[in-house]
Structures are given as structure tokens and as C-alpha cells.
Image: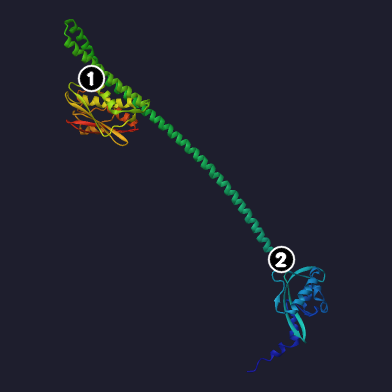
Amino acid sequence: MNEPQFKLSFASPETLSEIFQSSAEGILMVDAAGIIQLANKAAEQMFGYQAGELPGKPLEVLLPQRYREGHAKHRESFRQAPSPRKMGVGRDLLAVRKNGTEFPVEVSLSHHQISNQFIVIAFIIDITERKKAEEAVKRSEEQLLLYAAELERKVRARTDALNKSIEDLERANHFLQEQIAERKKAEEEVKHALERERELNELKSKFVSIASHEFRTPLSTVLSSASLVMQYKEKGDLAKIDKHIQRIKSSVSHLTNILNDFLSLGKLEEGRIDIAKEPLYLRDFLHEVIEEMKPQLKEKQNLTLQLIGKEKSIHTDPKVLRNILFNLISNASKYSEAGKSIAINVTFWENHFEIAVIDQGIGIPKDDIKHLFERFFRASNAGQVQGTGLGLNIVKRYVELLNGEINFTSQEGKGSTFTIILPTT
């Protein structure tokens, strides 16, 4: 197949010249000495020269004055090692027009041997509009950065303001919580005061009720026995006088016990019991307690003492311990028949000791056990046995003041054992 005939006309000098002149890029052909040999129309218009005015001029005429001296060295360097390349990679290139105005350009270099001459071909593009666009983008980016910085500042300021508001709210909430807590505390104190007042009123009411009942019998006994003593004195009947004197003593002792119970309860309620511990040997102390209690025992009742384990000195409050034992022994005597023995057993351990008061009395009904330490409570089988119902409540509170505990076992009709457990120090 024959090749198209237009190939020859395409490669004709006229065609090449037309392409050279009609190119949108500026094209310069420069010899080894740096003299412009050819310049196309685009190059002439770009640099502000008339047609045919550029050939014969040194290339440096198209560069700003400050770059001309250095450019000759770059040109010679290219001639020594020619290769197609772009000039000014990574930096801006400036050219100068005939009228002296500077403008940015982009230059690509190539080379060729024509008639044994080294020719450099420079393709030049005026990038003024591109630079303006880049500058506009750069300004936009700077404005965006400034806007972002301003926005960040505003966000930070708003965040600081919000944090301050949150802190203010937290302080206000904390203050409110404190106010609520104080109000609740005040309400609790008022509630507690009202409860205390109610309890005191109840205490007074029960005191009046018990006093009117419990005081009447011993006082009547004292009055009648005193009258009989006067009668028997006139008759000289010493045996009956002695009997009634003992009845008077017993009644007075009972009245004393009642008053002591109420005084002890009052002090406990008001928190006026101060604990003063001191060294104490239980054997001697318990013998003193037994001797003090003997006159209050029923006929032919006796107290026995047994110590188990190695006796050691203890530290406790003797007054409080005496009141505890007086109450427990007094109860054991009251709720036991005449002639029954009451045992006091002491057991020593490493860090504590136990005192058990064991009787053979009427015992405690099962239904009453859960109420035993309540104020004014008396077991359903107490019958006519005198008492205020305060003794065991006082004992329990005394034991707690000594950092101890109280336990008991009981069987109705067979007796009870009350055990106090106290620390040795």
C-alpha cells in the first residue's frame, strides 16, 4: 500500500516554519555563544519586540539585570552536559520585556546540532495569569488559615466560657447540696429532738404510772410497820418489832432501787456517764459485791463465787461494773424462791473475761425473750414481783459503755443465766 502523499508537504520547510511561527508557546533558538538566532511570533509578542528584532541579540537581554551575569555560567554548564530539562525547578523564573517590566515564565530546554552548530531550543510560557491564580489561592489559603485561627480562638474562648459556666454551676450545685445537707441535718435534728421529747414524755408518763404503783406499796408498808412498831413497843414485843423493822428496811431498799434505776436511766439518756477505768482484781471486788448484796437476798438464798482460768488484773470502771452486777444479782434473787442458790462464775480468757450470774428462778417465757432489754418491759410471768422494767435495759447500756456485750439463756420454770463479756483493758 502506498503511503499518503501529504507526508512530503507536511515535512516541507514551509510547513515547519508555519508550525514554528504559529506555536502558542514562545520559542527561541540560541547558539553556543548565547546569541538568539530565531524567535517565533509568540516569543516576540511575549517580550514586546517587533518582528525580526530579537535575532542577533544576546539571550541575557531577556533576563532582569540582576540575573544576567550568573546566567552565562548556567548556559555554559548546559552546553557542557546538554539534556532536555525544565529550568528553575523548585523556584520562580523571571523574564524582562523590552519596556523593562518583569514577568514570570516557565522555560523548557532542548538542544540540537544544526550544520555542526550546537543550538539550544527554549520553549517559554508566560505564567503571569497562573501566578495570579496561585497567589489568589495562596491568599485564600492564608485567609482560610486566618479564619480557622480566628474560629479556633473563638471556639477556645467559647469553651473557656462554657467551662467557667460549668464550674459556676458545679459550685452552685455544691452549695445547693450543702444547703440541702444542712437542711436535712436540721430536719433530722428536729426529728430527733421531737423523738427525744416524745420518748421523754413517754418516760415521764411511765415513770408517773410506775411510781404511783411501785412507791405506794413500800410506802404503805413503811407506814403500817412504823405504826405497829409503836404498838409492839408499848407491849415490849421485841420479836415483832424486829420483824417490822426488817420490813421497813426492805421497803426502803426497794424504793432506793427504783430511784437508782430512774437516776441511772436519766444519766444514760443525757450521756452523762463518764467511764473511768482503773486496775482491778475481780476476786476481791466480787467478794465486796457479794457482801453488799447479802442483806437484799431472800431468806436462805446464798451467793457462790467460782473463778475459772488464771486470774489477772483487769482495767475497767468499778462503779459501772458494780451497778451491772447489782442489777443482775438483784433480779436473780427477786425471780428465785427463798432457799435457792445464785452462782457467780468468772472465766478468764486471753483478752477478755466473762461473768455469768446463774439463778434457779422462774425463767423467761419464749415469747418475751425478744423484748427483754426494752425499757419498762416486764416478762408476762413476773406476777407480783416488784420492779420497774428498767434494770436489764440499763445493764445492757452499761455493758456497751464498757465495750462489752451481754448474752443470756433461759428456760421457763428452771432459771436463767446472764453472761457479760468484757475486755480486760
Q: Is residue 99 above or below residue 228?
A: below
The x and y percentages for residue 351 are 32, 36
Q: Amino acid at mark 2?
A: Lys
Q: Is residue 235 above or below residue 66?
A: above
Residue drawn at point x = 22 percent, y = 10 percent: 226
Q: Earlier in the sequence, mark 1 or mark 2?
A: 2
The N terminus appears in which quarter of the rendering? Answer: bottom right
The answer to which quarter of the image holds residue 298 is top left
Seen from this angle, which residue lies furthest bottom? 1
Task: Please state which of the two labelled residues, at mark 1 or mark 2, is closer to the viewer.
Answer: 1
On screen, residue 232 versus residue 172, left or right, reads left
The x and y percentages for residue 45 are 78, 74
Q: Residues within 10 Å of mark 1 (few under 14, many from 20)?
A: few
Q: Which residue corresponds to mark 2?
A: 132
In three-dimensional space, the C-alpha distance between marks 1 and 2, rounded to whole angstroms, equals 124 Å
Q: Amino acid at mark 1?
A: Pro
Q: Residues within 10 Å of mark 2 (few under 14, many from 20)?
A: few
In the image, which disc is placed on residue 295?
1
- Judge whether residue 393 can be spotted in this image: no
The x and y percentages for residue 365 are 20, 32
- Judge whether residue 194 can be spotted in this image: yes
The x and y percentages for residue 65 are 81, 69
The answer to which quarter of the image holds residue 116 is bottom right
- State yes or no: discs 1 and 2 in contact (Cβ < 8 Å): no
Q: Secondary structure at mark 2?
A: helix
- Residue 58 or residue 150, whichever sits in front: 58
